[in-house]
Amino acid sequence: MLLIHCPYCDETLPEVEFTYAGQAHVVRAADPASQSDEEWENFLYIRSNPKGPHYERWRHLHGCGRFFNAVRDTISDRFLTTYKAGAPRPELSSLLGDRT
Amino acid sequence: MARFNALSLLKHSLTGHKNWPEQWPEAQPRAEYDVVIVGAGGHGLGAAYYLAKQHGITNVAVIDKGWLGGGNTGRNTTIIRSNYLYDESARLYDHSVDLWEDLSQELNYNVMYSKRGVLMLAHTVHDVQSFKRHIHSNRLNGVDNRWLTAGECKEYCPPLNISPKARYPVVGGALQERAGTARHDAVAWGYARAAAARGVDIIQNCPVTAIRRGPDGRVTGVDTAKGFIRAKKVAVSAAGHTSVVMETAGVRLPLESFPLQALVSEPVKPIFPCVAMSNAVHAYISQSDKGELVIGSGTDQYTSYSQRGGLPLIEHTIAAITEIFPIFSRMRMLRKWGGIVDVTPDRSPIIAKTPVPGLYVNCGWGTGGFKATPGSAHVFAWTIARDEPHPINAPFTIERFRTGRLIDEAAAAAVAH
Amino acid sequence: MKSCRVPGRGRVDASRPVTFTFDGRRYGGVAGDTVASALLANGVHLMGRSFKYHRPRGPVSAGSEEPNALVGTRRGPGRFEPNTRATVQEIWDGLEVTSQNRFPSLSFDLGAVNDAGYMLFSAGFYYKTFMWPRGFWDKVYEPFIRRAAGLGASPTEEDPDSYASRNLHCDVLIVGAGPAGLAAARAAAVEGLRVVLVDENAEAGGTLLSEPHLQIDGRPVWDWLASELSVLKALGVRIMTRTTAIGYYHQNMVGLVEKLTDHLPALPADTPRERLWRVRAGWVVLAQGAIEKPLVFNGNDRPGVMLAGAAQTYLNRYGVRVGDRPVVLTSHDSAWFAAFDLQGAGARVQAIVDTRPSVREDLLHEARALGIPVKLGHTATASSGRLRVKSLRVNPVQGGRVGAPVTIACDAVLMSGGWTPSLHLFSHTQGKLAWDEEQTTFLPAETREDCVIAGAGRGLWGVQAALEDGAARGRGVAAALGKDSTARAPRVQGDRTGTGITQIELPTDLNAGRAKAFVDYQNDVTAKDLRLAVREGMHSIEHVKRYTTNGMATDQGKLSNINGLNIAADALGRPQPQVGLTTFRPPYTPTTFGALANYHRGDHFELTRKTPIDAWAEAQGAAFEPVGQWRRAWYFPRPGEDMEAAVRRECAAVRGSVGIFDASTLGKIEVVGPDAVTFMERMYTNPWAKLGVGRCRYGLLLGDDGFIRDDGVIGRLAPDRFHVTTTTGGAARVLNMMEDYLQTEWPDLNVWLTSTTEQWSTVALNGPNAAKLLAPLVEGVDLTEEAFPHMSCAECTVAGLPARLFRVSFTGEIGFEVNVPSPMAMQLWERLWQEGQRYGITAYGTETMHVLRAEKGYIIVGQDTDGTVTPYDAGMGWAVGKSKPDFVGKRGLARPDLVAKNRRHLVGLLTQDGSRLEEGAQIVFDPDQPIPMTMVGHVTSSYHSEAVGQPIALALVEGGQDRMGQTVHIPMPDRTIAATITGTVFVDPENTRLKI
């Protein structure tokens, strides 16, 4: 069971309080009508699914209820960071730098 | 290929089994192949076999980052069934069951296909509606599947608790008698041996790092840990790792990889005669020929390549098993393990050509790929050989996610009101 | 009966006799015995049979790694478990023990005929045969193979015991309470660090319990141990025995299972049998020691052949001499000490046979002093004795040549092939192992977890080394947690350290191809099986394992993995790391299902949500159905009524006068804020801007793929406040979806979402008399057609209770839904029930609700839709706000397949013969086609309708909305039913009955 830091509560808590919410920074177009079928397919379904650092969303369902973003290494399941929704996407190099 | 049969077994036993040949040689990559298949699981090895046997294409390599059959082929709960709702799925899986029936003879390798029956348990009115929909659809598609009352379920599967006082009482079930299990490793080994006998190279411990494309966009080969291998066609059937491999060819897919756990109990004398599944309480169980209860769990909620999985899911899985089969409470879990399953948005596979000429993909089997192994391998080989889908896999395109023509078995089964 | 108990030895209490039975025969042991030690004390080695060849077997170990001595244990009805390790199970008065995998008896087993077919039943033989004749597989071969499955028998009764679970947080978790673990605990127990020390055995001490000759800090070891344990307790260390660390999960979560009652003669009241602990530790110290390896030689499995370390444990811990005339066979120094100990306890050791050409001088010296013959540079090539070993055949080996044999008569063979560090939990962390060529074993390298290994697990040998390493690791962990620890390891006297070499199967002068040299005892895997697997192309250790089943027995390779790897590596001519090590998987030892399920049994398997009206419904004799986590009243049968009769009566009552229905399970979400209307416009298909305060509208929710997700009536209570209802099962999903869009797509919107499902309970009144019944009880709203028309809502007072009143109908009759705070719901219900008596008020359940709504063509999401249905498919294009620039699902709805012709449409069906269709039945246009048929839809809802006078159905049919009046066919197993496509509204299409 993972331990997850909620950036809103500023607490590290067990996974059972959270729900996974898929890849992060998948933006719903401001004007969906302008989207081609392919663009809409990308938005709905196409995912990066990387082996390594993954930008993803979690929700602190049984806590503050907020959605937030995280970078997690899908090989080790370790969280590199978590950050508030809307905050800029952190550069991978800065995150990996901390580890070595 | 040295034939396997009782006589050869007896003959070799007299010489201390010292003269059995290798079931497949340890191949080193040649410079070029007509077809390179990435992923030596049942699907990849099977595709190689059918390419050689049915399409006469024998200049084929199957390349794996680890040992053959070491992915989901060797990690699943071996359930085989074809009682799917939609025509497209029913045809694909029933094609597989047809091939399972004679696979041991076909491969000269006993894969122990055991038609012990798969019983799917209904617990709610909604389950009954959904199961009846499946049963009627299956019947008109020529797929066996019939309704059992709770009492008949108990008769078919004596360890079952059908007390109406249970939290989710069993109200009936759908039984596919032709369904069952097979020995998973034997499937990989049998295909490997039969493919190798027809000239296919099986190259293990050789990660594919990239798919290369020429200036015209067409695939030219694969970069591997053992160097570049030229190929006229590349076919990827790498399960959980498909996204990673396909990304190197610039193809992004609607796939996410999740950890899936399974477990076995200590072995006991025969007690569980069939396969039983309950979607409502998430319990999947059968008994292996060694006597272990083989139990499937669900996927963890997050994507991962760690093959690790958490304890809460195991607790929930075992709770579900002891809820439906309370006599197993004092049994013990012997071993649990994890696999990585690649899941599509509609929970149906993709077996198709890709936008890249010469590149083919077979993926998205989620938790249910083992049962489809022969059928999927067969139609995938057809697709590779002819550069067009077999009628059975024609609906399982990548494009369906753009048009919305999904084959959504999960949506059809779920959603309570 | 022969006694092999050595007076004055061991930690058992000879003054407290204990009686138990084995295969019905009574045996005496003493307090502190395990089943194995007690049987050995009675001279009984034969305790089990192997899996494949049914070979007679005795215990080979004295711990949880035991592969052979597995027994059934019983404590009265319902309390039987198979495959219990006799080497672990403590005895108590009345314990019933039975042997397994034998017929008719343990000493005479017909299954042993397989042993004669030994050469035939080689590794993987079943893959090569049983294929002809083709038809024999299903009928003959497979049933035969399946009958051979398993060791013990499964329990067949429900388990009367209970199980528990708890969470535990600590700074340091130490697994293994041997010398390394004890020293680590002492060093880590500083300045309030919470330290937990767990051990799978009945008492802490590990190897110290088997080495009574030691002195630690000048005191006899057991005195030192007792006082050290008290010191640790005084320092606040939590010591848990009979507690196995089963698995090591992400971020230092370790699962423990504590056995609480299996060792007790009488079950204490209200005590669970086992307890699962979920421990989250700051640091984990793994001090699990090492496991001794058997030697692989022809006949190494006869009862009486056991590990030398186990024999030492039986003697020193249990006071049992496992043989009077043992032979010691070893490639490691440690077994010499077993020989010395046994000789000192009255045994006459027949010989120490060492595979090494030379050994330490002090060992030779002591052997000579004790009068034990020594044979160096020897191999063992055979043993004899059916139910107990009688002799060992040994030969000198010189220059790789095996010389002439000598047969040594004996009653036990005590072997040691060296030691394997126990790294199972470390492997669970996906920690990397490094091959140590010198010790021929894997040692821990690195892990991502905050975890250290101490003692023998790191390849350190001897008690002094373990204590020192434990102390150092404990100090290191304390330092990592910011504490300064100065603890130093105590001094050990009499420590027996040693070295050894690693052997593959021992060299022989006999035909190696026929040798019964076992590597995996339980699964009967021999060295020749491993070599056959390699010969056949199984070049990965995982292939070898799977082909031979080596390491797949209930000890999960604890005894067999390294021997198997060494032999496979030798056969391949490759170094071990290139062949690989199979991954250890949780659990460390087999773990009771009950402990894993713990509290989640019966009613606690999953919580049951009940409405405030549930108790009333139960008192009325309602039948219930589970819907999601809720249980809902399904129908209210009167005496003698079946479901059909009850539903018919309930339907008639609603259409005839008034019915009362508990709709409290409907999901309710409060959408509030200045941007509430904008939010609703974007979430739901319908337009909301023009919906007046005090008015309701049916809302349809799609996913962004364009398919229907949920629906419900939504009331606007104020310009900035909506009362949203959802389906019963969809409430949580819908709220999550709303939060997702609000928080991450439209964070600029000022809106609050609150689940109010549990706060409001909902009582529905439906029927021509509903308004008449309700009006006198309502204050603040005039229940007339003019003042409060259909689809109105208001906050008011009902029966003196604060209420949200909705005039809505899911039946086609005049309908109201009264929402009151849940604690007041029963009060409201009873008042309405009482006032309604004059109208013959009738309570109805979900089945009647379903019939009445189907008569009106109202859909149920999840029954009439299935996740592939658009609003247009469902005939609800009217609910789509086409002029809105966007809403969730709008773009999805425009995708090519969603606008294609011939999609399946929801329509009504009336059978031409008046029969009732089955829900889920499939529909075809051409009934005469062969199978497989082209199906064009299915029946989603089907009920008998009193109001219509015949059964009605809803169905999804290809192009159905353009096929009104056409005939479709429903092929059933016995006949084909013809039905006419109709509209979906069967009753009162003009909605005249909705008017007051």
Image: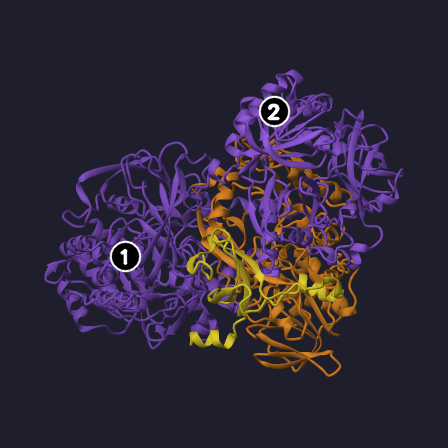
Residue B279 visible in this rendered orientation of the protein: no
Residue B70 coordinates in the image, percent (x, y): 55, 64
Residue located at (72% from left, 66% from top): A39
Residue B53 coordinates in the image, percent (x, y): 73, 66
Look at the picture and state if C191 lies above or below B176: below
Amino acid identity at mark 2: Leu
In the displayed structure, does residue A36 sit left or right of residue C264? right
Q: Which residue is mark 1?
A: C194
Question: What colour is chain B?
Answer: orange
Residue located at (46% from left, 62% from top): A7
The image quarter containing residue A55 is bottom right
Residue C306 visible in this rendered orientation of the protein: yes
The image quarter containing residue A43 is bottom right
For the residues labelled 2 and 1, the Cα–Cα distance comes to 62 Å
Q: Between residue B392 and residue C807, name the one nearer to us.
A: C807
Q: Between residue C422 and residue C440, name the one nearer to us.
A: C422
Mark number displayed over residue C777: 2
Q: Chain of mark 2?
A: C
- Residue situated furthest right in the rendering: C966
Question: What colour is chain A?
Answer: yellow
Q: Between residue C5 and residue B56, name the one nearer to us.
A: B56
Residue C235 coordinates in the image, percent (x, y): 20, 55
